Amino acid sequence: MATFVLTCIDKPDSLALRLASRDAHLDYVRRHPGFVRLAGPFLDSAGGMVGSLFIVEAEDIGAAEAFTASDPYALAGLFERVEIRAWRATVGALP
């Protein structure tokens, strides 16, 4: 297994779309407990959600790409861009 960081940035002015898709997104993420190690939203200066960060453990980058592509947020067209990078923890520990 490898660890990947998924950085997902929302399209501008898309908070309404994020909120409309949020329950389905959270349900999707909760159905992948061994895959998703840590996740949460990026916040703007006012505390509004503007993107998502995931730390996942996957067989390969293709599995991480497939996970992101099937996320209800992605299916709703929320993300302006998604970046997936291999990553290794050096300090601290993942849950």
Image (cartoon, rainbow, N blue to C red):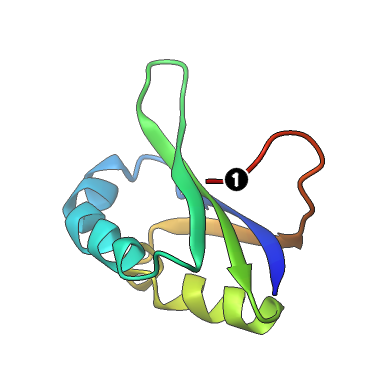
Is residue 65 in view from this perspective?
Answer: yes
Task: Kindly identify the residue that appears in the image at 46 percent across and 25 percent down.
Answer: 44
Is residue 76 in view from this perspective?
Answer: no
Q: Is residue 4 left or right of residue 29?
A: right
Dot 1 amino acid type: Leu
Task: Kindly identify the residue that appears in the image at 75 percent across and 60 percent down.
Answer: 85
Question: On screen, 36 above or below 93?
Answer: below
Question: On screen, 59 above or below 89?
Answer: below
Q: Position of residue 10 (x, y in %)?
A: 46, 48
Task: Kindly identify the residue that appears in the image at 49 percent across and 70 percent down.
Answer: 68
Q: Is residue 56 left or right of residue 50?
A: right
Compare residues 87 and 68 and report the one nearer the observer: 87
Residue that badge 1 annotates: 94
Q: In the figure, residue 76 lies in which quadrant?
A: bottom left
Q: Position of residue 42 (x, y in %)?
A: 48, 35
Looking at the rendered structure, the secondary structure element under dot 1 is loop
Q: Position of residue 7 (x, y in %)?
A: 60, 51
Indicate the quadrant containing the N terminus: top left, top right, bottom left or bottom right.
bottom right
Q: Position of residue 40 (x, y in %)?
A: 43, 42
Compare residues 88 and 5 and report the one nearer the observer: 88
Task: Kindly identify the residue that appears in the image at 33 percent across and 45 percent down.
Answer: 14
